[in-house]
Image (spheres, rainbow, N blue to C red):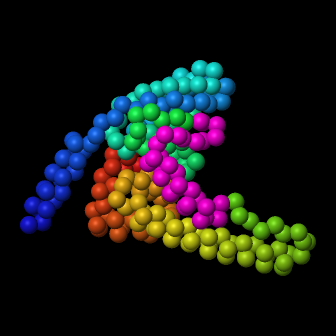
Amino acid sequence: MKQRMILLATLLVVFLSASAKKLKVTIDGTASPSQQTLYLIVNEDTAKAQLISVNEGEFTVTVKVNEDDFIRLSENKERPTPSSVVIMADERNISVDMESRTVKGSYMTDKLRAAIKRIENAGPGHFHIDVFTDDPKAWEEAKTQERMMREEMKEQQRLCARQVLEDERYNDIPAWIVIVFPEQVSPWLNKYIEEESMWLEHPVRKKK
């Protein structure tokens, strides 16, 4: 029975992959006038990264992908960060401003960016307590308080990440969230693995 269930699950994944809607996405964008090239990386497959030209601060590129693939535009191939310019392929024409890190024309990209912002804003970021004293004891007390507050913020960020995973569980946004927020989502990931959430099978997860 168990082997039969595994076979059915495998066939379902193959079917979904084969039936994924193909899109020819055209991305028009602007960048710094000093920028000459950008990498276009689909689903973090850096081995197949496409180098695109930037001419006088403008670029355009057309790529054929599956719907809801993740397209990252970057000055280099390094591991993505929450501030990376990432597009979820759900429309045929999308505009990007590399300097302001903004994307227009993509509903799913807007949802992805909102989810990332929620988690970022819940964390400590650059929070610190300024200490204006020469008293070693007062300085140590302030730094201890800072560490405690940062840990509380980190815990709130982990709880926020869990809520984002739950809110977006029926689309592919969590597949990207677990890449850029590995520490924050790690306490909750097993739940979705046990439930065999479909976003776990997104191609970007194979390149993590």
Q: Please tell me how many numbered marks the rendered image carries.
A: 0
**Residue 46, can we see it?**
no
Q: Position of residue 110 (x, y in %)?
A: 50, 49
Judge left or right: residue 144 versus residue 53: right
| Residue furthest top as drawn | 55
Quadrant of the image occupied by residue 169:
bottom left
Q: Which residues are magenta?
A: 97-125
Q: Residue at x 46, y 55 (%)?
A: 177
Q: Position of residue 116 (x, y in %)?
A: 53, 55
Decide if residue 5 is in sight here: yes
Rendering coords of residue 61 (x, y %): 46, 26
Residue ID at (64%, 37%): 99
Q: Residue 71, position in %: x, y?
A: 44, 39
Q: In the image, what residue occupies the spot 67% across and 76% down? A: 148
Classify 164 as above or below 51: below
**In terms of depth relative to the viewer, which is nearer, 188 or 198?**
198
Could you say which quadrant of the image residue 41 lies in?
A: top left
On screen, residue 152 above or below 11: below
